[in-house]
Image (cartoon, rainbow, N blue to C red):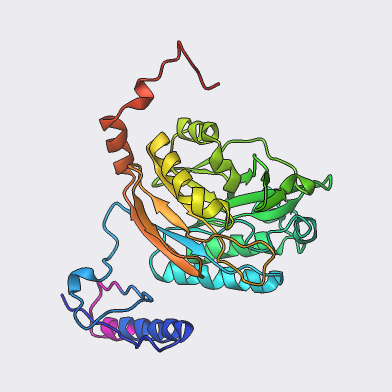
Amino acid sequence: PKVWIFVTTRNTALETRRQMLSRFSRGLTRGLRKMRFNNIFVLPTVGFVSAAASLDSLPEAKKQGTVRLALCQILCGEDKKVNIANAGKAISEACSNGADLVILPECWNSPYDTSCFPVYAEPIPSAAREISAESPSTEFLVNAARKNNIYLIGGSIPEKDSTGKVFNTCIVINPEGDIIAKHRKVHLFDIDVPGKITFKESDTLSPGNTVTTFPTPFGVVGVAICYDIRFPELSMLMRRAGASLLVYPGAFNMTTGPAHWELLQRARAVDNQCFVAAVSPARNPSSSYQAWGHSTLVSPWGKVIATTDHKSSIVYGDIDLSEVESVREGIPVSMQKRDDVYMLN
């Protein structure tokens, strides 16, 4: 095997490195195919390689039987069109790096602000064929999933229903462009931590009332939103429905994030012996609500597989869902529950 390494200096701007690396990858792939090298894997990555780095430290190709997740931590601002464009760039980059399942953050098309939710809210149809000009974010998600042939968990956006109620809603689209799941945030974020943060989603949002899972060729996936992760009963019901991966688009803040963001993900992973992915917006210095960031992927053993800081980035993780069954067989808590003492209805 031959390895080509593309190196830029630390002084090169991040976006410039991305553009240079993308052109290098495309050119290399075309050139090798003309030379009849057909089995090519080009993985553009943004990072630094020191002069002493070994080949063993370089990213590997996706192993057979694994699923590549891409957690897109994007910057969200006041301009919906710019937010949609940012999401599109992140999805394209994730797909160029081999992602099978791409996940956006909570409220990616809107500022996370109760006064903004009704203003940015859109109708979300139950089927792609019913999309109208009033639903540009949904139309974008459907087209992105179909174009890139991926499963796309569309973070969440403010949704307005026919009665005027507003929900914090996540939709899931399959590679054919079908809307296959819809989750409205069940537990609204109403908190008051004295001297630190007060927030009340219920000022403008209504709660959902469903447990949401959907099937894929690689396993059943459960979806909930942000504050939902604090309620273990909901995650237990998703596991009962067959989920081996739980996904939480979320936007923890500078008070709850450092204290509980990773802790809750690891807790839900260990509780349910499954993978957990939580995807945050990037921190926006000009926003009234400061997101913690740190999008993270956790294993069924409670180990952090991949994470990041608060800046715009994409977190990748290759997971083997057979690991879920291995953990559940080794520690068979689901078979040891005491229904004579307690029961989850």
Residue 82 in picture, x, y percent from top left: 66, 74
Within the magenta stretch, is there residue 37?
yes
Residue 307 in picture, x, y percent from top left: 41, 60
Q: Compare residues 76 and 36 and report the one nearer the observer.
A: 76
Q: Compare residues 194 and 189 and report the one nearer the observer.
A: 194
Does residue 225 sit above or below 7 in this rendering?
above
Quadrant of the drawing holding the C terminus: top right
- Residue 141 horizontal side relative to residue 98, left or right: right
Among the 4 quarters of the image, the one containing residue 43: bottom left
- Residue 1 horizontal side relative to residue 140, left or right: left
Residue 70 in picture, x, y percent from top left: 44, 61
Q: Is residue 225 visible?
A: no
Does residue 291 sit above or below 4 in this rendering?
above
Q: Residue furthest left?
A: 1
Total marks shown come to: 0
Among the 4 quarters of the image, the one containing residue 60: bottom left
Q: Residue furthest top?
A: 340
Q: Residue furthest right?
A: 163
- Residue drawn at x 70%, y 69% as measured from the top left: 80
Quadrant of the drawing holding the N terminus: bottom left
Does residue 38 sit above or below 32 in this rendering?
above
Q: Is residue 326 visible?
A: yes
- Residue drawn at x 23%, y 78% as measured from the top left: 37
Does residue 35 sit above or below 170 in this rendering?
below
Within the magenta stretch, is there residue 294?
no
What stretch of residues is rendered in magenta?
A: 30-41
- Residue drawn at x 62%, y 44% as measured from the top left: 183
- Residue drawn at x 84%, y 44% as measured from the top left: 163
Residue 273 in picture, x, y percent from top left: 37, 37
